Amino acid sequence: MIKNSFEQKFKDTYNLEYEPDRLDYTIVHKYTPDWKLTENTYFETKGRWISSDRSKIRAVLKQNPSVQIVMIFQNPKLKLSKSSKTTYSDFCDKHAIPWFDYKDTRGIKDFINRYK
């Protein structure tokens, strides 16, 4: 579906196929994890977890398969947005990202001790 009148005019003039393909691209950025547990295991602490941060974590994990990032949420039951039914913890579960509620000090300490 053509998105605006300028694109429609172009199509009418040149009769080319509109948006037939999708091309992959990568933009290189640097990510600095909050806390280091081991050489390849990190903690990321979040109060608010916005869409760009979620995308960043997924991209970092995809491009660094030997790295583990464990999310620590101030409130893992917060919704991704006002209109979403998905919580921060649901998102992590869906994408196989380990997570903890920051109030779960026992669970976090046990996790840390497994790596010491």
Image (tube, rainbow, N blue to C red):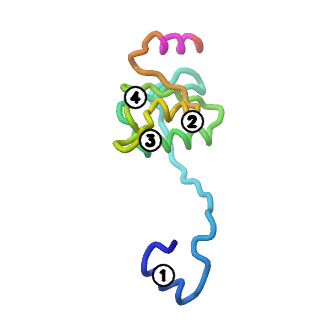
Q: Secondary structure at mark 4?
A: loop
Q: Secondary structure at mark 2?
A: loop
Q: Residue at x 59, y 85 (%)?
A: 15
Q: Residue at x 60, y 82 (%)?
A: 16
Disc 4: CA contacts within 10 A as few (<14), some (14-19) or many (>=20): few
Amino acid at the residue labelled 4 = Lys
| CA–CA distance in space, label 1 to label 3 | 35 Å
Q: Are marks 4 and 3 in contact (CB under 8 Å)?
A: no
Which is in the foreground here, disc 3 or disc 2? 2
Q: Which residue is mark 4?
A: 77
Amino acid at the residue labelled 2 = His
Q: Which residue is mark 1?
A: 8
Q: Are marks 1 and 3 in contact (CB under 8 Å)?
A: no
Amino acid at the residue labelled 1 = Gln
User: Which quarter of the figure has residue 39?
Assistant: top right
Q: Secondary structure at mark 1?
A: helix
Q: Which residue is mark 3?
A: 53
User: Which quarter of the figure has residue 97?
Assistant: top right
The quadrant of the image that shows the C terminus is top right
Q: Which residue is mark 2?
A: 95
Compared with 47, 13 (above or below) is below
| CA–CA distance in space, label 1 to label 2 | 39 Å
